[in-house]
Image: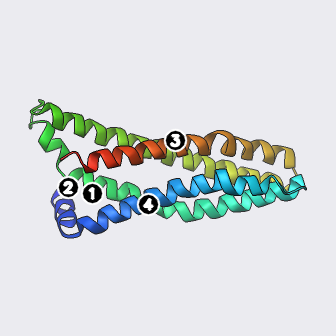
Amino acid sequence: MKAFMVELFASYATEIVFLHVLSAVVWVGGMIAMRFAAHQSFMQIESPLHRLERISQSLKRLFTIVTPFVIILIVTAIIMAVALGFREAAVDANGNVIDDYAMHIYNLVHVKEVIWMIMAANLSMMILRRNKAQKLLNKGDSTGAKKALELIGKYMVPVNITLGVIAIYLGATLRHAY
């Protein structure tokens, strides 16, 4: 599998990096647009029920759009991490550090991977909360739906935006590491 990823990256490096960056932009940018642009428009809707319905519908659309990009981002991250040989540059076959700078870069790769995985888990939880809110709305429980959706907008999306910006910065750092 490693040989396949190395060959794939050797043949399609530009395309893989492009898909990785595009995926990060769509995911993080979509959350920024939802939180700081769309959210403000939703607050102008006078009817609380219509506001909740519009928020739920918009989140469903956002999650439908970003989910394939999250998958592409993770797949391209794995391909790049393996193909670029960060581990081989940092440690020998016994796990002994052979180059401190390479080890630092290898650790940054892992930090970035962990950030994206935390974000993916948070996204999964947001999807579950949105689905729960929609079910509550369908049952006429707007109070319960509001509680489910509030957590997404107040905490979950801002956490993912912050982590996403950090991961993008680390990606720019890693791009110029060698």
Which of these two is toward me, 126 or 62? 62
User: Rounded to the nearest whole Å, what is the CA distance between mark 1 and mark 3?
Assistant: 25 Å
Q: Secondary structure at mark 2?
A: helix
Question: Residue 146 in the image: x percent, y percent?
Answer: 80, 46
- Which residue is identified by label 2? 83
Amino acid at circle 4: Ser
Amino acid at circle 2: Ala
Identify the image quadrant of the N terminus.
bottom left
Which residue is found at the position 13% from the left and 36% from the top?
91
Which of these two is toward me, 172 or 96? 172
Quadrant of the rendered image containing residue 103:
top left
Which residue is found at the position 51% from the left and 45% from the top?
121
- Which residue is identified by label 1? 79
Which of discs 1 and 3 lies nearer the camera? The answer is 3
* Residues at marks 2 and 1 touching, judged by CB atoms closer than 8 Å: yes
Quick check: 16 above or below 153? below
Quadrant of the rendered image containing residue 13:
bottom left
Q: Which of disc 1 and disc 4 is earlier in sequence?
A: 4
Q: Secondary structure at mark 3?
A: helix
For the question of whether residue 70 can be seen, the reply is no
Q: Which of disc 2 and disc 4 is earlier in sequence?
A: 4
Colouring of the image: rainbow
Which of discs 4 and 1 lies nearer the camera? The answer is 4
- Which residue is identified by label 3? 162
Quick check: 14 above or below 33? below
Quadrant of the rendered image containing residue 147:
top right
- Which residue is identified by label 4? 23
Amino acid at circle 1: Ile
Give the side of residue 46 with respect to residue 158, left or right: right
Label 3 environment density (alpha carbons within 10 Å; few <14, some 14–19, many ≥20) = few
Quick check: 65 above or below 167? below
